[in-house]
Amino acid sequence: MSSKARVVIVGAGFAGLYAAKALKKAPVTVLMIDQHNYHTFQPLLYQVATAGLEAGEIAHQVRATFQKQKNFYFRQGIVIRVDWQERAVMLEDGAAIPFDYLILAAGAIYHDFGIPGVRQNGFFLKTLSEAVNLRSHILKQFERADADPSLLEKGILNFVIVGGGPTGVEMAGALVELFDLVLPKDFPHLDLSKAKVILLEMQDHLLAPYSETSRKYAQKILERRGVEVRLGTTVARVGPHELELKSGEIIPTETLIWAAGIRAHPLVNALGVELANGYRINVNDDLSIPEYNQAFVAGDMAGASDKSGRLYPQVAQVAIQQGKHAAKQILKLIGGEKTTAFHYFDKGLMAIIGRNAGVAELSKRLLGLRFRGFLGWLSWLFIHLIYLVGYQNRVQVFIDWAYNYFSYDRHARLITQMRPSPGELVNKTGKLATEASPTESNNTKVTF
């Protein structure tokens, strides 16, 4: 057993990954726990769902990422709670993982806001299995329509996206390109004019955090390319074959893609700590938990606020910076120093609307430059390639993007199914796997 301080990181997302990297040369042992043995680059999940990329191109093995980091260890498992008195992380299999310092970075799931039927009938985009299964479902709908054209009148090719943020806008743009440029070659005898992409947003504009000019540009491009954008629209109920709006209107569809909001991972409910809005964990200004100053929260789980009291956005850049900050605070505590407050360095916002169309707005600290159209699109591609984990993944994604761009084709049109892991079922149930079906604990204590 190592005499060095033991740092346990829960989650292999952006926050967890960058926290572990920040501890590379520290006099500690680092153990990362995640239900998967890979990191998922979530900003590109929609491209997997729309056949632009393969699943393996946006995921990278955790162990491979840290092969050269000698103080790093990995454990695949599902965390169900934390024993604060014993300073141990409890896993679903009964193991107890002791820690001296803890970083909670398990991420988030989509928030259904209590709307009936969303979890049971909607599709989400937070994990690889969800993206692959959505792609398979979309392609199956076209196969079914080709085999039985009478289904077209029942709305089998109505694809409804709820949420006009970056995910919803990017998904809508990618879908209409798939329908207009790629699938006509696969289904020459099917009337693809019946395929509809409907984007619903409850506010009176898309891309809420962006400037009004960028919002209007995104809406104009989407509508020009065939997306039916409906603002000021709220969903009341979702069924297996239709959804109902609060206005009473019924939209026939078997494909509801939910991108309307997220909430912190349900693990927060099992921690016995105070929660802020969005089920995020209330934290001190240094990202530590008030009751437990040896534990820090980073990324989508953290209820950290800026100077005006507004919660930080649940985006990759915030997670990356918070992960690094949490790691640095642990080093300060080990060295007997005082911790410091987290301050977010806002680099700006980016969204892609489709081929040659994107918006990029740099923050005032980066001169406040704004790009739309081809330059916005190119900026988005460049930044995402930089942050994609794994050199091989970057090369392969670049090749696929170039191929798709010049050939007007997408090679990943495979109908396959991925079985969700127990931990992923929270998107359908809203509960941890162990909350739905408890298992016996053998209280095995693990050391590292």
Image (tube, rainbow, N blue to C red):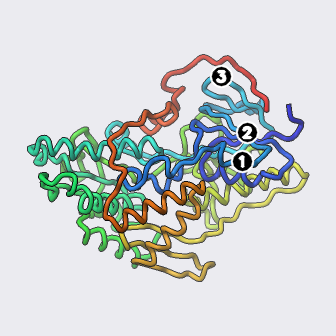
The quarter of the displayed image where residue 82 is located: top right
Q: In the rendered view of the protein, which quadrant contains the C terminus?
A: top right
- The amino acid type of the residue labelled 1 equals Phe
The type of residue carrying mark 3 is Gly
Classify 418 as above or below 376: above
User: Disc 3 or 1, which lies upstream in sequence?
Assistant: 3
Label 3 CA crowd tier, 10 Å (few <14, some 14–19, many 20+): some
Q: Quadrant of the N terminus?
A: top right
**Which residue bears the numbered disc 2?**
73
Residue 156: image x %, image y %? Answer: 19, 46
Q: Is residue 377 above or below residue 399?
A: below
Horizontal side of 418 relative to 293 (left or right) equals: left
From the image, state whether disc 3 or disc 2 is nearer to you.
Answer: 2
The kind of secondary structure element at disc 2 is strand
Report whether 355 appears left or right of 282.
left
Separation of disc 3 and disc 1 at Cα? 23 Å
Residue nearest the viewer, comparing 407 with 440: 407
Res 191 → quadrant:
bottom left
User: Any mark on residue 296, and which?
Assistant: 1
Instruction: From the top left corner, tell me how far across and down residue 338 is, in percent.
Output: 86, 56
Answer left or right for 365 relative to 170: right
Q: Earlier in the sequence, mark 3 or mark 2?
A: 2
Judged by depth in the image, the label closer to the viewer, 3 or 1, is: 3
The residue depicted at 30 percent of the width and 68 percent of the height is 222
Residue position for label 3: 94
Measuring from the top left, give residue 144's x and y in whole percent. Answer: 18, 41
Residue at 57% across, 48% down = 60
Secondary element type, mark 1? strand
User: Considering depth in this image, is 142 or 278 the residue closer to the camera?
Assistant: 142
Q: Residue at x 25, y 39 (%)?
A: 239
